[in-house]
Amino acid sequence: MPTEEPPQHEQNDLFGAHDTVKPRRRRRRPDGLTAEERDRPFTDYPVLREMESASAAGKPDQLPLFMSAQNGEFSALLGGLPVLTPESSLELARAWYRRELEQTRRPHNTIESYSYDLAKLEERIGHVPIAKIRQSDIANYLGLTDNKSTRKRRLTSVRRFFTYLIQTAKVIQVDPTDGFYPHSIQLRSPIPLFEVEQDALLAAAASDEHWSLTAIWLMLRLGLSRSELLALRREHIDLADPEQPVVFIFYDDVTKRGKERKLAGDSEFARIYAEFVERKAPVDLLFSVGFQAVNVMVERVRRAAGLAKEVSPQVLRHTFAVDRAKTGAGEEQLLALLGLADDPRNRGSVRRYLKLAEPPL
């Protein structure tokens, strides 16, 4: 049946007085309608549908930025979350805080740990507006922990949460975690490798997989942590002076930029690294493995070296620090070499290295 044309005066309004548009007849496909055709709204005027489709295509591809409040005013609506206020629920504040952690690219495990602890806080104190959380609520929350480590972690989580609400979100002024302090947890004394043990370990690493010697050398001779090792890229190794390469340590996490540093290699590393690149030919990341693979490799090399002493990536880092202390590095230099923040706990760590580096009595 032919498609009926709109009246002439409507055509003039839509398309201009001198334009004549005749809707085209569409044939039905032998195998029926396509999904696209089935989803189209019915119309007698295809030009109108095309105008509607063009308008839809020009719609901004983003979430709404504002919401309408009960009084008719607009307020920010970032990613679907209502605006944060002193009367907001703890649940909403937790969601905003998690988004802040994600946007600042905090490690996934850190985000999950903080989120879990804050969920436990809400589970304990109930649905309380953030401005009405008191020190008694925090005491109630911390008092149920089973041990010192759990209490310290939960206190850290809630303290950083309220720091965010006060300093970043600026929705409250009083920190209910003030006056609470973590237990002092004694650090284990490091047991570094002696020189002969270091030599045996490097020799065994040279006979292991292609990447083992380079990885162990970087942890043992430059003090890289396991996470720093696995973040290394080819572009982080400066070979402008082939005899004295420089290793740059970078962090994607903006909160850890203070740990960034550059460390001087030597001719031994230049040779080891050149052989590694020739054999392994990494394109970007130097070590495309996970944390557990590093642990397994270190343990495998320890056994091959015939060492009875415990050896781990952290032991290699301890050994580096003690050796640098023996050559005259002080507290400030050790903090810088290891990429440690200047706080009492880290000061205590480097003082242990300095004590182990002292001459025998």
Image (cartoon, rainbow, N blue to C red):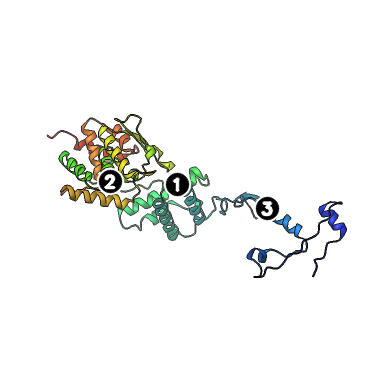
- Left or right of 109? Residue 305 is left
- Residue 111 or 144: which is nearer the viewer? 111
Element type at marker 1? loop
* Residue 359 horizontal/vertical position (percent): 15, 33
Residue 249 in which image quadrant: top left
- Disc 1 residue crowd, few under 14, some 14–19, many 20+, Cα 10 Å: some
Residue 215 in sight here: yes
The reply to whether discs 2 and 1 touch (Cβ–Cβ < 8 Å) is no
Nearest to the eye among marks 2 and 1: give it. 2
* Residue 139 horizontal/vertical position (percent): 39, 54
- Left or right of 195? Residue 175 is right
- Left or right of 164? Residue 16 is right
Query: Which disc is residue 72 wearing?
Result: 3
Q: Which amino acid does label 2 sit on?
A: His
Nearest to the eye among marks 3 and 1: give it. 1
Mark 2 or mark 3: name the one nearer the start of the chain.
3
Q: Mark 1 points at which residue?
A: 105
In the displayed orientation, state which residue is furthest to the front: 30
- Residue 327 or 290: which is nearer the viewer? 290
Question: Quick check: 33 above or below 52?
Answer: below
Q: What residue type is labelled 1?
A: Arg
* Residue 27 horizontal/vertical position (percent): 72, 66
| Measured Cα–Cα span from mark 3 to mark 1 | 36 Å
Q: Mark 2 points at which residue?
A: 210
Mark 2 or mark 1: name the one nearer the start of the chain.
1
Mark 3 or mark 1: name the one nearer the start of the chain.
3
The reply to whether discs 3 and 1 touch (Cβ–Cβ < 8 Å) is no
